Amino acid sequence: MKKGVTVDNAAMLLIDHDVCIVYPALNAAHEGFEMELVADAGGSPSHLADQTALRMMEEHGVTMTSTNHLLEERAYSW
């Protein structure tokens, strides 16, 4: 991140919800960032792992969104 740039919110998308994204998303939410997870941009090896990771993130303040909703939201806010 560039010096002097302030970020209040972020959207994350990675391949594995239960390995690559769950802890960075939880840490960012804990640090006060408004986090959005693009839930349909990734997944996990099993349905149980995926649902557990998504539920854990949602319980800790991470907002779930979809690719289409994220793009529409960004286009509307320009």
Image (cartoon, rainbow, N blue to C red):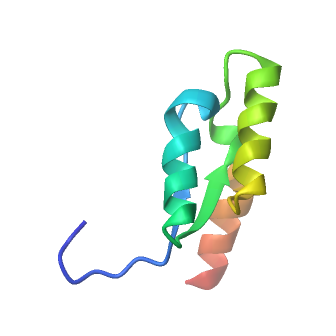
Q: Above or below — where is 71 with respect to 4?
A: above
Q: Residue furthest top?
A: 45
- Position of the C terminus by quadrant: bottom right
Asked where in the image residue 42 lies, by quadrant, the reply is: top right
In the rendered image of this protein, does residue 57 appear above or below residue 69? Answer: above
Pick the residue in front: 12 or 18: 18
Residue located 55% across and 51% down the image: 25
Q: Position of residue 36 (x, y in %)?
A: 63, 60
Q: Residue placed farthest to the left in the image? A: 3
Q: Is 34 placed left or right of 53 in the picture?
A: left
Give x and y (percent) for residue 60.
Answer: 70, 57
Picture coordinates of residue 22, whole percent (x, y)? 59, 41
Q: Residue at x 78, y 55 (%)?
A: 59
The number of discs equals: 0
Q: Answer left or right for 63 relative to 10.
A: right
Residue 64 screen position, x and y as percent: 74, 55
Find residue 62 and report its image quarter: bottom right
* Position above or below: 42 against 65: above
Q: Residue at x 71, y 36 (%)?
A: 53
The residue lying toward the viewer, choosing from 72 and 10, is 10
Q: Along the line of sight, which residue is nearer the eye, 64 or 23? A: 23
Is 13 drawn above or below residue 77 in the view shown? above
Q: Quadrant of the image for the N terminus?
A: bottom left
Q: In this rendering, would 44 be left or right of 12?
A: right
